[in-house]
Image (cartoon, rainbow, N blue to C red):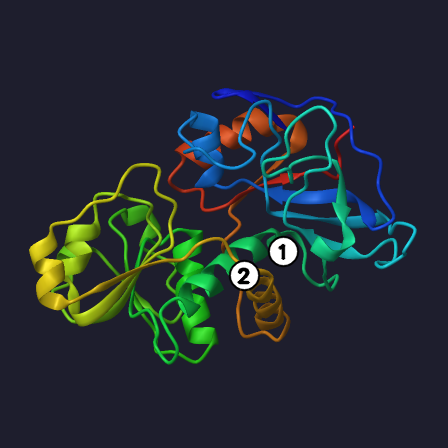
Amino acid sequence: MVFEQPGRMAVRRVRLLPPSAGDCVVDLEWSGISTGTERLLWDGRMPPFPGLGYPLVPGYESVGRVRSGGEQGRIPPGTRVFVPGSSGFADVRGLFGGAAQTLVVPADRLVPLDDSLDQEAVLLALAATAHHAVVAAGQGQWPDLVVGHGVLGRLVARTVIALGGPPPTVWERAAERASGGSGYRVVDPADDDRHDYRRICDVSGDPTLLDTLIERLAPGGRIILAGFYHEPLSFRFPAAFLREIEIRVAAEWQQPDLERAVRLVRDGDLSLQGLVTHCQSAQAAGPAYRTAFGDPDCLKMIIDWRSAP
């Protein structure tokens, strides 16, 4: 899957770098489409980012089987693994490089999975992102308001509960996304009169919301910015000053976040069910991307690579 330039995509052959002794060759089964970073790459709105340039292979939510484990044999062939992207291409950029039929990836970047995890395993990157955001609330603290009920917002709420926190409130304005709350309450912000939230986790990516969120904080509260914001953020100072608030940015997940997310899923504490709503073959990638970016009923679109020629 190659973004040739903003707004133009092709499914075409690319050359892989020769695998080194520490690399695995992975045959992909499924990859997810991100409606955050991939949409920005597609629209050409992604801010300057290390390694950014076109043509590029997008994607960082991939699951496949190890074809060969490299000379060091660290992962046996046939093992199902989660792949958080790849840079193993010779003639295109790998940002983030996970949407390809075959990948060359360092073995230490792969996460072996149980075969009981099928296509929903593409969600592990978002589960790790959710865990990173929850931890950003601070030790002994939990997000008590989550803004946005897409896949990431749902996973943040589920992760809070999985880790033993009280169920948060989730804000969602779009009626088609208000259902599906699993053990927590989903409300339209217009119907919520609380102004004493201690930790607000915003996954909306909306750069205009800060003033609204600040007004809903208790004194000393914290806002965790867990979305990706392609425009400058600003806020009116007096309300923030009077409440003496904190603003914390939750950046990219780290390996411990992914490992913890995998354990939570494996142990049955965190469910990934009900989040993948659409699936298309690699040959139908164009319609798949249009649906993922334009259909509000599409929570998560995945690409099925198993029948790719």
Q: Name the N-terminal-most of marks 2 and 1.
A: 1
Left or right? Give the position of 244 relative to 177.
left
Q: Nearer the viewer, residue 260 or 286?
A: 260
Q: Find residue 272 and name its label.
A: 2
Q: Where is residue 80 drawn, in percent x and y? A: 76, 55
Left or right? Give the position of 283 relative to 15.
left
Helix, strand or loop under label 2: loop
Helix, strand or loop under label 1: helix
Q: Where is residue 130 drawn, in percent x and y? A: 46, 61
> For residue 93, which quarter of the picture?
top right
Q: Amino acid at mark 1?
A: Ala
Residue 153 to residue 131: above or below: above
Left or right? Give the position of 23 relative to 139.
right
Q: Are marks 2 and 1 in contact (CB under 8 Å)?
A: yes
Screen quadrant of the C terminus: top right
Distance between the alpha carbons at the discs numbered 2 and 1: 8 Å
Q: Amino acid at mark 2?
A: Leu
- Dot 2 surroundings within 10 Å: few (below 14), some, or many (20 or more)? some
Screen quadrant of the N terminus: top right
- Dot 1 surroundings within 10 Å: few (below 14), some, or many (20 or more)? many
Residue carrying label 1: 121
Q: Residue at x 53, y 50 (%)?
A: 276
Residue 62 to residue 49: above or below: below
Q: Where is residue 100 drawn, in percent x and y? A: 69, 35
